[in-house]
Amino acid sequence: MLVTLRRAAAEASDVLLVHYVDTGAWHRETARPLLRDVAEIVWAAPAARRVVLLECGDFLAALDWFTHDPRPRPVGPSYSITLLGLSTFGSPHRGEEFTATLAAALQSGVADSPDLLEMATLRAAVEARWAEICFSDATECSPGPGKLLHIEADRVALGTNVAVRPFHDRPARPFPPDPATVLRSLMEWD
């Protein structure tokens, strides 16, 4: 994995997108050095924009590695990293899987949102879907829906918004634009 990542990072000139998912039963002794290596590779990349999607149990340690340039004398760009992530410490509530929900948002689009799905829009849409799940079955989601951490150095779009297509060509159920929209719609039903 690291060999492939090093090669891709060395060749990236515009955008380097790294999606790290740790869903296995990793031991901290194994996961932490791997995450630190991934962060160092991302920081060393010559890419103009670095984007990291992170879903792992060692999220807080990884956050430090991905938000602070580890190089004593940075060579190449010293831009910050755009990060969107979720800690999987413990287990997420039913339906609150970051990777699957993010992929679904990209496939379904986001209602009342711009043509391009930037990270901030996707964060709000993923959290909105989690709010829908949480409030549809409150016993499964205590104390409330999950939250993503979003640090944005650059505005980066991960896809086009299929929910802005003409009505006959739209997906059946685009994601709501934010958790507040979900709460407003629930209050309207009462």
Image (spheres, helix red, strand yellow):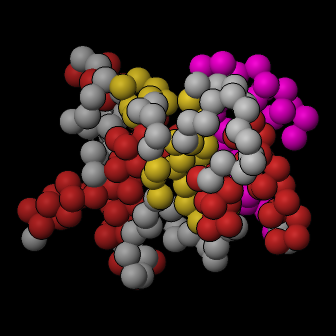
Question: Which is nearer the eye, 46 or 145?
Answer: 46
Quarter occupied by residue 182: bottom left
Quarter occupied by residue 111: top left
What segment carries the magenta color?
1-25
Can you say whether 12 is above or below 73 in the image? above
Can you say whether 16 is above or below 54 in the image? above
* Image position, residue 149 (x, y; %): 47, 58
Quarter occupied by residue 121: top left
Count of marks placed on residues: 0
Whether residue 93 can be seen here: yes
* Image position, residue 88 (x, y; %): 62, 67
**Left or right: 183 with respect to 78?**
left
Q: Determine the residue positioned at 56% across, 69% down.
A: 92
* Image position, residue 38 (x, y; %): 77, 47
Which quarter of the figure is the C terminus placed in?
bottom left
Question: Which is nearer the eye, 9 or 171?
Answer: 9
**Left or right: 49 with respect to 121?**
right
Q: Determine the residue positioned at 56% across, 29% down.
A: 49
Q: Does the magenta stretch include residue 177?
A: no
Whether residue 189 can be seen here: no
Q: Determine the residue positioned at 28% across, 47% down.
A: 176
Q: Determine the residue positioned at 33% across, 61% down.
A: 132
Q: Does the magenta stretch include residue 10?
A: yes
Which quarter of the figure is the N terminus placed in?
top right
